[in-house]
Image: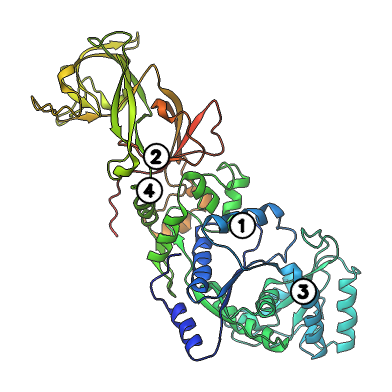
Amino acid sequence: MEHNSPNFIRNIIKEDLETGKHDHIITRFPPEPNGYLHIGHAKSIILNFGVADEFNGKTNLRFDDTNPLKEDVEYVNSIKEDVKWLGYEWDGLFFASDYFDEMYNRAVLLINKGLAYVDDLSGDEIREYRGTLTEPGKDSPYRNRSVEENLDLFERMRDGEFENGAKVLRAKIDMSSPNINLRDPVLYRILHAEHHNTGDKWCIYPMYAFAHPLEDAIEGVTHSLCTLEFEDQRPLYNWIVENCEMESKPQQYEFGRLNLTNTVMSKRKLKQLVDEGFVDGWDDPRMPTVSGLRRRGYTPEAIRAFCHEIGVSKAYGAVDSQVLEHFVREDLKLKVPRTMGVIRPLKVVITNYPEGQVEMLDAEINPENEEMGKRQIPFSREIYIEQDDFMENPPKKYFRLFPGNEVRLKHAYFIKCEDVIKDENGNVTEIHCTYDPETKSGTGFTGRKVKGTIHWVEASNAVPAEFRLYQPLILDEESEEEQEEKTFLERVNPNSLEILRGFVEPNMKDTAPQDKFQFFRHGYFNVDPKYTSANQLVFNSIVELKSSFKL
C-alpha cells in the first residue's frame, strides 16, 4: 500500500513509538451509517488505515450507530463495500451499539460521582440556558438533584416511562466555561425508536460526544484521528475518558477536512439532492460519494494517489476538483484500451469504395503500452463521423471535413468531401466522399499531407451506445459572498448531465460493467453498471483527455 509523505500525525505516532508511550498503534474509521461515504471520508479512511499499515498497527471499522432515526443497514453495507473497494481490510468490525450496556453503566458511574444529572428542561430551554460565546450560561433548576433522585430518574428513562424529549441526562461540568461544549452537555436522550442492531431493547440513546470517546477507550484506540470541527470537543472527549474511569486513554488529533470545488460534502445536503431527485441516487456519477466516483469510473488507485498528494494538515481550504481528475487521468492512461466512439453521428458514404466489401484494419490497443497488443477494426463504404467534424461553410483554420477538403481517417485512409445531402429543412443528413486507396495507414504513404485527422466507426457493424457526459454538479460562484447569497440548491447546475446516442466499434459489444476505455479525442469512459444491459451499452464520461490544470 502507498504511504503519504511525512505529516504531523505520522510524526506524532513515530515519536510515541520511539519514546515508548505506545508499543503498538490502533486507529479506527468511525462513520455514522446515515448516508453513503464521500471523497472526504476516503481521505480519512486512507489516513487511518495508511498510518496503521505503515507502523504495523491495526485499524477498526466502527459504526457510530447512536441515532436510530437516521441509520440503516443499507448504509452499513455500502460503507463496508467502499472501504474494501478503496483497498483496505479492517482488523475489527464494531458498532457503537455493541457497547450500549457499558455506556449506560459509565453514565450511572458519573451520576454516582455527582458528575451527571437528569434535566427536565426542553431542548429550546437548554439552548437558552447555555449562553453564548460572550455570555456564560446559567444553571438548570434541576442541576442539584440528589444522586438518588438522578439514579431513579435515569433508570425510569431507560425503562420507557417518559416520552421523547421529556428528560435528558447531562454532564455536570461548568456552565460558565469559555468552551460551550463543557457547559453541561447532554449525554443521553429519550428516543422511542427501533434500532437496526438492538431492536427495541433501548429507548434512551447516548449522544455522539459521549459515546465516541468511550468507544475509542473500550477498543484501546491509541490515536483518535478526526477533522478540525471536533477540535473544540477535545476537552469534553478527555473529560469523559477521565471521569468515566476508562483504563485506556486514547488521544484525539484533528486534521483539516477535504473540501473540493464544484461540489458539496455535507451528508445532509447530499441526501437532499437524492431525496429531491436532483440526482439519480447516492451513486449518481456526478456525486462526490465513493459509490458515485466508482460508477463514474474513478479508480481506487487514483483516489489514494490524490489523497497522498494533498496530504494532511491543520489547514482548511478547498482543493480544485481538477487535481483529482489529474490523478484519474494519470492512472488510466497506461491501463485502458484506446478505441473510437462517435457520440453525435453523421453518415458518410465513400462512393468509390467497393459495395459490399469490408476490410479489417490493424490498430494498437494502447500506443503508450505496447504490451496490450493490437485490435482489428472493420472498414467499409459507409461510416459514421462526428457532426462536429464536418462544416459546410468552415471558418479559417478549420482543418476537418468540408466540401473539397481532404482529411485522414484515423487508422484508415484519406477521404475527400465531394457532396452534401440535406433534408427538406436544409439539415445535413449525409455526406458523400471519395477515398484514396494509396493512403492506407501503416503503408508509409508520403505523397501528400493533410492537416486534419478524424475518428469514425464503420456503419454496418457499429454497436449503438448511449454516452453520458458530465459537468460539475454545483456551480461555484465568483466569490464567497455570492455563494453565501444562494442556497446550495440554487447553485445546482441544470446542465450537469447530457445524454447522447451514437456508436462504438464492434469489438466493444462484449464489454462488461466498469470496463474503462479511452475514446479517441473524447476522453476516458466507463461502462455504466446501473443501466448497461444485454441490449444497451451505456458509457459514463470519466475525465476529458487533457486539462489546463497544472500541479
Q: Nearer the viewer, residue 362 or 524?
A: 362
Dot label at residue 523: none
| Label 3 residue SS | strand
| Residue at left offset 28%, top offset 25% | 361
Q: CA distance from mark 1 to mark 4?
A: 25 Å
**Quadrant in which residue 105 is drawn:** bottom right
Dots 3, 4 in contact, CB < 8 A: no
Which residue is tagged 1? 79
Outermost left residue: 447
| Label 1 residue SS | helix
**Quadrant in which residue 247 is drawn:** bottom right
Q: CA distance from mark 3 to mark 2?
A: 52 Å
Horizontal relation, residue 163 to residue 386: left or right: right
Q: CA distance from mark 2 to mark 1?
A: 27 Å
Horizontal relation, residue 130 to residue 45: left or right: right
Dot 3 or dot 2, earlier in sequence:
3
Quarter of the rendering occupied by the C terminus: bottom left
Q: Nearer the viewer, residue 519 or 140?
A: 519
The residue type indicated by label 3 comes to Tyr
Within 10 angstroms of label 4, few (less than 14), some, or many (20 or more) residues?
A: many
Q: CA distance from mark 3 to mark 4?
A: 49 Å
Q: Is residue 122 above or below residue 178?
A: above
Q: Is residue 102 above or below residue 239?
A: above
The residue type indicated by label 2 comes to Phe
The percent position of residue 134, horizontal first and vertical second, equals: 57, 82
Dot label at residue 517: 2
| Residue at left offset 37%, top offset 65% | 309
| Label 4 residue SS | helix
Dot 1 or dot 4, earlier in sequence:
1
Which residue is tagged 3? 188
Q: Nearer the viewer, residue 446 or 107?
A: 446
